[in-house]
Image: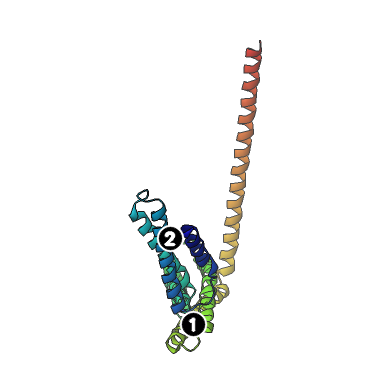
Amino acid sequence: MVKKNSSLILLLLISAFPLQAIQSSTANISTALVGVLSGAASYAIECEIPNKIPPAIFVSASCCITAVTYMLLHRSTPLGRIKRANILLNDLSRHTLARTCFHSDKAFYDAVQDVYLTDDLPLISAYNHLISLLPTSHYALSLINKASAEVYKDVLLQEECDASRSRANTLFKNISDAIKRIREHKDYLSQLALYKESLAQQQQTIAQQQMASAHQEIAQAKQSGWWLKLVGLIFGK
């Protein structure tokens, strides 16, 4: 009975916390409670089936459950959201065109050539890469805004939110400006036409390969059917 009740309470605690706003103190208390219940459940199981399961397994399981609970709960605190946002912003900052504010078109296009030196269509490669960064910047900003709405009167945490928001807005502006500059370049449309033509050729090649593969499978099926008929005739006699 103790084992069932402890396990039930433990499962309810883990599953009942939605990934919404909670404070760090709440996350810490909840994690400690889950750790205590996990230990109690392990002790109850050990009492019911003594010497059947090594104690190290109970200890490892309890530690894993507590660690996972801590991680999940702290992801939903304002500080956890800010940390997740900063990780995303760090990833965005690795891109030269996202972290740099170019004051001239020449400096920008020189950077594009340097970054995409080995690409046949550098403008299109840069454009596609920058477009792929936009969802990440939007998500990071949404995490920061959620954290800012949840900090209440925590001045230090609000300052972290403001700093992260300023950084996110700067990166988003750099990305937007870069996309605009690429689309305004005199070679953009010609490279885009070549890119679309290349995509069409690739799709045509893939379609031809699929068709050839289908014909080959049909031929193999017919050949297998012919051999089956021949074997049937031979052994049927």
Q: CA distance from mark 2 to mark 1?
A: 44 Å
Badge 1 density bin: few <14, some 14–19, many ≥20, Cα 10 Å: many
Number of numbered discs visible in the structure rendering: 2
Q: Position of residue 237 (x, y in %)?
A: 66, 10
Judged from this view, the residue extending furthest toward the top is 237
Which badge, 2 or 1, comes first in the chain's sequence?
Answer: 2
The answer to whether residue 117 is visible is: no
Nearest the viewer among 174 and 104 is 174
Residue depicted at x 39% and y 59%:
43
139 vs 21, nearest the viewer: 21
Residue marked by disc 2: 41
Residue 13 screen position, x and y as percent:
50, 67
In the image, what residue occupies the spot 59% across and 68% down? 189
SS at mark 1 in the image: helix
Q: Do callouts 2 and 1 mark residues in contact (Cβ within 8 Å)? A: no
- The colour scheme used to paint the residues is rainbow
Image location (x, y in percent) of residue 46: 38, 55
- Note whether residue 20 is visible: yes
Q: Quadrant of residue 113?
A: bottom left
Q: Nearer the viewer, residue 104 or 176?
A: 176
Answer left or right for 184 relative to 72: right
Q: Position of residue 141 (x, y in %)?
A: 52, 78
Circle on res. 219: none
In depth, the one of 223 and 57 nearer the eye is 57
State the mark number for residue 165: 1
* Image position of 78 with respect to 65: above or below: below
Q: Residues within 10 Å of mark 2 (few under 14, many from 20)?
A: many
Q: Amino acid at mark 2?
A: Ala
Amino acid identity at mark 1: Arg
Disc nearest the viewer among 2 and 1: 2
Report the residue at 62% width, 46% height from top: 207
